Image: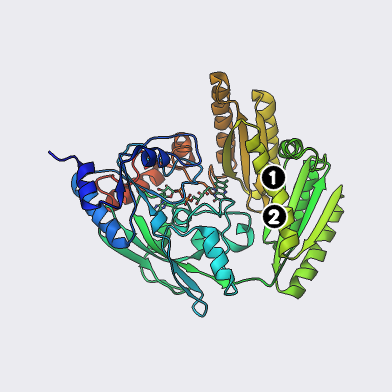
Amino acid sequence: MELWTEELHRLFPDKFSTSEEKLSKYATDAWLLSRAPDGVFFPESKEDVVALMQFAFSRGIYVTARGGGRGYVGGAVPVKGGVVVSFEKMNRVKEIHPIDGVAVVEPGVITGVLQAKVKEMGLFYPPDPASVMECTIGGNVATNAGGPRCLKYGVTRNYILGLEVVLSDGSVAKVGGRTIKNKTGFDLTSLFVGSEGMLGLVTEITLKLLPFPPLKACLSAYFERMDQAILCVNKILSSGVLPAALEIADRFTLQCAREFTKGEIPPFDAHILLETDGSIGAVHSDIEFFEKILREFQPKELTRAVGEEACEKLWESRRLFSMSLKASGLTKLNEDVTVPRSRLADLISLGEHLQRHYGLIVACFGHAGDGNIHVNLMVDWSKKENRDKAEEALNVLFDSVILWNGSITGEHGIGIAKLPWWNKAVSQQTRLLHEKIKKALDPKGILNPGKFV
Ligand SMILES: Cc1cc2nc3c(=O)[nH]c(=O)nc-3n(C[C@H](O)[C@H](O)[C@H](O)COP(=O)(O)OP(=O)(O)OC[C@H]3O[C@@H](n4cnc5c(N)ncnc54)[C@H](O)[C@@H]3O)c2cc1C
């Protein structure tokens, strides 16, 4: 009898591959685990996806969607084999409509490419994951991606007006629409956003666009102590004016960045980066206002930048924090926990405690305004003893975050990386509800199997 992979070769000679090179390329994302699929499918249209899903459904073949493969939790890793559907050829921006304030795109469009395209027309697509030049809109939808600007602008979910989704049996659901307001039935669009490829394959996305803000300005401030920086964050957030982004970094992050840049980063224990944007007059007055607040907390160094280019320079040095951790050669377990903002100081102290207690480097930085801090455990993965310590430290981290009414992931999703803590993070009722929804939409359990539902 013909193997199903051979059948797919016959049905889609140019769109299905089982070459060793492809199987190994599509076996991983930006997390640790790797598992090769049995084949990789490269659809060029919705019709291709429908045909594949009809085939897979009739034979019970596993299907895992893939965008840019930049996920941090193993979400696109086909842990049970089967077919990986890579959306890289479905990368057309079908429409940008300035009056409606919408863009209609295929899922494989790179997020940064879309942002540049709409900017040429004076429009703005705000969600800004740091992987923006490599990740796709489809992946952003499936993970409900965030980024620094989410403080003012919200996450991917806030920009999704409508979706076209191919369900597990090959049927096509169109949910939502292209209007800013829409209360027709259940909010099924939101159900698919953040569903990590387990409820359907997204083949078209209608996005909301905003006018591009005429001006932005940034402040970068270094403090002697973290408690000063956290008090400053609290004051900014209760000042009545909301920045677009409010980022923080701790001693260990700055230390790594200092070593990496051979002293470019000054020798202080805490850093704040603030961005504000809007009309020219408003930005000039807001940046004065924020600078006054920052100065109350006696920063050791403070830099003001006005305009896109000057701001980008400050963001570049902020990006060095992440790069310098990677350059250490250690394995970086990047946990994107989120706590109520009043718990920020507790979270940073916990990072310091984990570092002391387990003898691992723990570097914290991220989106202070959202209470969403990347707690990075830096581990020498070659030693079992260190891997065990990291697991213990992660248990303590997640237990504490749950106790503080926080969430174990604010941006990256559950995937496989957070699977061990899924049961603790949500109630039994919530898990049951997930299972019922999954069963209704994917009765044979063929979509992204082996993940959290
Ligand atoms: C350096 C770096 C920085 C990062 N910074 C951020 C950040 O600031 N904020 C943030 O939120 N994340 C960040 N991430 C994580 C990652 O970039 C996001 O999760 C992103 O949304 C993943 O998009 P992707 O296209 O790479 O998706 P993939 O990794 O390919 O897939 C992610 C998930 O989406 C599913 N999926 C993909 N396409 C579809 C589709 N068309 N239909 C259905 N399901 C689909 C996959 O099955 C998988 O479960 C970062 C990652 C890296 C490596």
Name which residue type carries label 2. Answer: Leu
Task: Locate residue 77, reporting x and y percent.
Answer: 41, 40
Establish if 232 lies above or below 47.
above
Q: Quadrant of residue 124?
A: bottom right
Q: How many marks?
A: 2
- Is there any visible trace of residue 268 in the rendered image? yes
Say the numbered circle drawn on residue 320: 1
Establish if 227 lies above or below 236.
above
Determine whether, in the image, residue 269 is placed left or right of residue 388. right
Closer to the eye: label 1 or 2: 1
- Is there any visible trace of residue 238 in the rendered image? no
Name which residue type carries label 1. Answer: Leu
Which residue, as the protein is rendered here, is positioned at the far bottom? 99
Looking at the image, which residue is at 45% across and 74% down? 179
Q: CA distance from mark 1 to mark 2?
A: 17 Å
Looking at the image, which residue is at 57% across and 40% down? 335
Front position in the image: 257 or 244? 257
Task: Locate residue 330, reporting x and y percent.
Answer: 61, 30
Screen quadrant of the C terminus: top left
Say the numbered circle drawn on residue 246: 2
Looking at the image, which residue is at 81% across and 47% down? 222
Disc 1 within 8 angstroms of ligand 1 (CB): no
Which residue, as the protein is rendered here, is positioned at the far left? 1
Task: Locate residue 317, reporting x and y percent.
Answer: 72, 49
Comes first in the chain, label 1 or label 2? 2
Determine whether, in the image, residue 142 is placed left or right of residue 245. left
Screen quadrant of the N terminus: top left
